[in-house]
Amino acid sequence: MSDTVKYLLGEESIPKAWYNIAADLPKPLPPVLHPGTKQPIGPDDLAPLFPMELILQEVSTEREIPIPEPVRDVYKQWRCTPLYRARRLEKALQTPARIYYKYEGVSPAGSHKPNTAVAQAFYNKQAGVKRLITETGAGQWGSSLAFAGSVFGLEVQVFMVRVSYDQKPYRRALMETYGARCIASPSNETHSGREILAKRADHPGSLGIAISEAVEVAAQRDDTKYALGSVLNHVLLHQTVIGQEAIAQLEMAGDYPDVIVGCTGGGSNFAGIAFPFIGAQLRGGKKVRIVAVEPAACPSLTRGRYAYDFGDTAHLTPLTKMHTLGSTFTPPGFHAGGLRYHGMAPLVSHLQELGLITSTAYHQTACFEAGVQFARAEGIVPAPEANHAVKGAIVEALKCKEEGVSRSILFNLCGHGHFDMQAYIDYFGGKLKDIDYDEKELAMALAGLPSVAEPA
Amino acid sequence: MSDTVKYLLGEESIPKAWYNIAADLPKPLPPVLHPGTKQPIGPDDLAPLFPMELILQEVSTEREIPIPEPVRDVYKQWRCTPLYRARRLEKALQTPARIYYKYEGVSPAGSHKPNTAVAQAFYNKQAGVKRLITETGAGQWGSSLAFAGSVFGLEVQVFMVRVSYDQKPYRRALMETYGARCIASPSNETHSGREILAKRADHPGSLGIAISEAVEVAAQRDDTKYALGSVLNHVLLHQTVIGQEAIAQLEMAGDYPDVIVGCTGGGSNFAGIAFPFIGAQLRGGKKVRIVAVEPAACPSLTRGRYAYDFGDTAHLTPLTKMHTLGSTFTPPGFHAGGLRYHGMAPLVSHLQELGLITSTAYHQTACFEAGVQFARAEGIVPAPEANHAVKGAIVEALKCKEEGVSRSILFNLCGHGHFDMQAYIDYFGGKLKDIDYDEKELAMALAGLPSVAEPA
């Protein structure tokens, strides 16, 4: 067999519908609650922030939600993304496992995020929206929305956490190249930003603050809406093109996964690769073991509590039931900005409660070690977030070697690391430490969870 | 018509042979001369630096040189690369032109350079070589050879011009991630490096010095060879997969170019897109206007002299007839490191002398303006080098608009700009200046050209 095994689909194979796992759940998702009344919210409550089409997707239980042709047209630029058999990595590991990876780094922004950014920009444009506001940490999401905005002629403003704004000028430059405006958060442009700056002029910012600023600006104007890059149901929905393509590509390979591995921050790339396979299983298909890999420094699925919590630190968002470290929990600084979030997507959390997925956590140096081994074997340098999935896949492959069995392992390589080489420099320079979260801070954050009972 | 028009070929369409333009030249290339004797050199003179297979390719006049299966196998990872119709750019320009671009940024190193790096690594491995030495400026070539070395299990050492080594830590980190050793040049590891450091300990380095160091190390050991990323015939040969694929893809589009545009530094990506079309023309096919675009700050084709000159400043290399600004000419600092070379590939120079190509030069701010317009329309952020090709294509498209004719324009987008965002930051910050070379320095460098007559 050849060393390079790539399964490619033509653009006619780009899925025509997103797969909505809500249709197949054995038990429905707990309702989203209003932050004030603690009662289930309706579509209208979300209308100041999102266009109605996206709100309807958020609550839909239809199995298939058609992908509009203009969205499929933009997808064509980089989709279908390739599925590779990692033959060189298998050889390096001397494993009998069959390792496959879906590579989402071929998108213009270098990650899976444009799958939903393009869809969100389209529906907002269709609803007559002129301007999208969002927040970004490391910048993967902000640059993807900037790209999507440039395609559909929407203005994009991104509140970027100040510490990232200062430390990641390349991501910021990418957003500006696409024509977006990038604002260091906390800023003087919002009430919530000014309030924080009044207390501390050199505040480094946080994702929670940036969300507050973005939501505040979006809610003020009718022609302006908010966009989120993960966590919400409709965001996860849009990512299911990944897993649907993978099913078709594995069919070309004459294979089907025994294990699927994805990294989890908010949960969107994990959902993208895993949900279509979980759905097939729920409808009577083969049982697949699904492993969510998270950073040991921010372990919502493995160490968080499954409870109602806010999505932001300022408590402006609705309450959702999810695995959470507490909305006041501040993850320590480590090199995978996309995974530094206190909560987990409600759908992913729900699946874990139902026993349909498992989760595990690794420290960052082990993940970088795995990423470098992968890069030297397969030629692609993964993003720090994706290194967690690589690590998870290698662990599974080495288990196969130990047990002398050949299992089929599929993982999602959600983005390349070309904007994150500083992390590799730190790794090679021995400056990367295995950071743990503060146990006391976690205990306090969990103690501060809102006391909300799930409605009967 | 859809806005995204992508022409994709399966891996079975990766060319089975490289196209050697030497077979179709109406007049052969002037011979390469020994730097000492000034007489034509033979294959054996190059044997200390290159494996014999590459030397034979360097002098071959066979039209088709078969691509070894292990090389095609590695190509499969990212080839065939996509050809796009730039519909959104056409709309933005309101031009009747049909603009196509071949995108080479999908390779693991982000540019066209792996096309030859993989081939060179393969032939060296086959010849029993253990270690490849090269030099790099901005790092596109060094990282591509590092990637190729990791695939074939070859040690790679890269002498990187010190000023780039300090200013471009991300490219260096990419080389190290692939397992290569990256050395700031001038270094203490070579005679020529030590000699320069003795005179000036903080010497910023130059490509000429880095070449001297690499050649010195490679020539010392039997298991060690030298690799070059452009200029030489065999390097240009390996890039012809680009143009061959483009011919097949334009056939799918039912089109054929009236104009082809490429940027030129050493000439390799330009040759890659243009040579297969020039060859078809020389064998009786349609005449295509071919435009080489170079930086106004380093204009070898438009302002250089067609004469015998050295490839390096230390005068260790053979003499080749080419368009040159003089081997002592130091191009000013501008943001397209891949185009800062005093000479031009002998084959490209020869074609210009034969009237088969034309050339033009642009300043960098105009090229960045074009690159940003392209990014906002097409979603891909080009490398600074590639922005020169984008500028050339936009000029041609606007000519069509002025004349009210629809011509077919093809250009090569040789790489993405994800490692070069500092240049965009400088552009947006108004810090990018239109730098001109020093007229006096050019006059002096040209006056210092070796006095060599072409053998009869």
Image (cartoon, coloured by chain):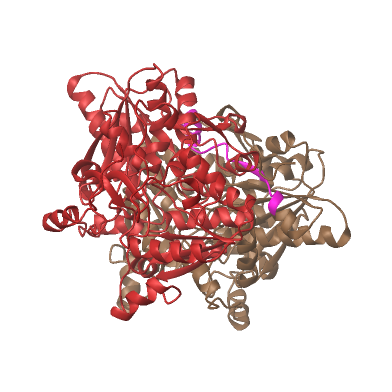
Chain colours: A red, B brown
Based on the picture, tell me whether residue B77 belongs to the magenta stretch: yes
Residue found at the very far bottom of the displayed protein: B440
B291 over A67 or under it: above or below: below
For the C terminus of chain A, the quadrant is top left
Q: Residue furthest left?
A: A440
Quarter of the rendering containing residue A163: bottom left
**Image location (x, y in percent) of residue A226:** 49, 57
Give the residue displayed 74% in from the left and 48% down from the top. Answer: B27
Q: Is residue A326 magenta?
A: no
Residue at 58% of width from left, 27% of height from top? B12
Q: Is residue A291 visible?
A: yes
| Residue B453 in view in this figure | no
Q: Is residue A388 left or right of residue B444?
A: left
Quarter of the image where one finds residue B246: top right
Provide residue A299's location: percent of width, then percent of height: 22, 47
Closer to the camera in the image, B300 or B195? B300
Q: In this rendering, would A128 be left or right of A31?
A: right
Q: Which is nearer the eye, A321 or B55? A: A321
Q: Which contiguous range is marked in magenta? A: B69-88
Task: Give x and y (percent) for residue B261.
Answer: 70, 54
Work out whether A389 lies above or below A141: above
Task: Name the residue nearer the viewer: B93 or B442.
Answer: B93
Q: Is residue B19 above or below residue A207?
A: above
Q: Residue at x 53, y 75 (%)?
A: B332
How many discs mark residues in the rendered view?
A: 0
Figure check: A422 above or below B299 = above
Residue lying at 39% horizontally and 61% vertically, measured from the top left: A211
Quadrant for the N terminus of chain A in the image:
top left
Q: Nearer the viewer, residue B442 or A381?
A: A381
x, y percent for residue B286: 82, 42
